[in-house]
Image: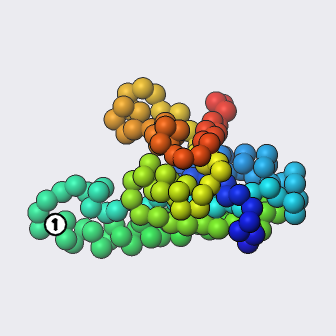
Amino acid sequence: MDSEKPAMLIAVDDSAHSMYALEWTLDHFFVPFGSLQPFRLIAIHARPIPISILQLAGPATAEIIPMMEVDLKKTAARITEKVKELCKKKSVNEVDVEVMEGDPRNALCEAVDKYHAKILVVGSHGYGPMKRAVLGSVSDYCAHHAHCSVMIVKKPKT
């Protein structure tokens, strides 16, 4: 892959919003340019750490963590495959997929710094104010903390 091209990162997870953002990005930044693609595409999947999901204390935690670890690895592999399949379908053969551990907000900002990204693309889950207050907004956090431009792709309402 041409490392001289500026990096464009796209956040990917298991949601329809994420895959829509990837498809939108491919259609608007990669497909029209053919082999003269202006960016190096890197998909970033932030895989949670099992203990951060459980937040339990006690003897059962030690038994559950290995099972969660296997499940999280399977999910990451499935997402990686979906990303590569969608890129191939759109004739975009040069894509790197990196799975990082940790909170998506921090992982994405770290990836921006690691790759010296010029732009970070994130999908919007479209949470309402209550859900966003509880779960936090990855896109909002990245828009304020990432050291590059952040584009938030919203899936049209049906």
Position of 106 with respect to 54 (left or right) is right
Residue at disc 1, secondary structure: helix
Position of the C terminus by quadrant: top right
Residue closest to the eye, 38 or 49:
38
Q: Is residue 137 above or below residue 55?
A: above
Position of 150 with respect to 134 (left or right) is right
Position of 66 with respect to 59 (left or right) is right
Q: Is residue 49 visible?
A: yes
Q: Is residue 88 visible?
A: no
Q: Is residue 40 above or below residue 156?
A: below
Q: Which residue is depicted at the point 53% across and 57% down?
A: 113
Q: Which residue is depicted at the point 87% across and 60% down?
A: 36
The residue indicated by pointer 1 is 60
The image quarter in which residue 39 lies: bottom right
Position of the N terminus by quadrant: bottom right
The number of numbered badges drawn on the structure is 1
Q: Where residue 8 appears, x then y in whole percent?
A: 67, 54
Q: Which residue is farthest top?
A: 129
Q: Where residue 12 appears, x then y in whole percent?
A: 57, 54
Q: Which residue is depicted at the point 87% across and 63% down?
A: 35
In the rendered structure, which amino acid carries the disc numbered 1? Answer: Ala
Residue closest to the eye, 137 or 20:
137
Q: Where residue 41 appears, x then y in whole percent?
A: 69, 60
Q: Where residue 55 appears, x then y in whole percent?
A: 22, 55
Q: Residues within 10 Å of mark 1 (few under 14, many from 20)?
A: few
Q: Which residue is depicted at the point 27% across and 61% down?
A: 51
The colouring scheme, among rainbow, by chain, secondary structure or one colour, is rainbow
The image quarter in which residue 93 lies: bottom right
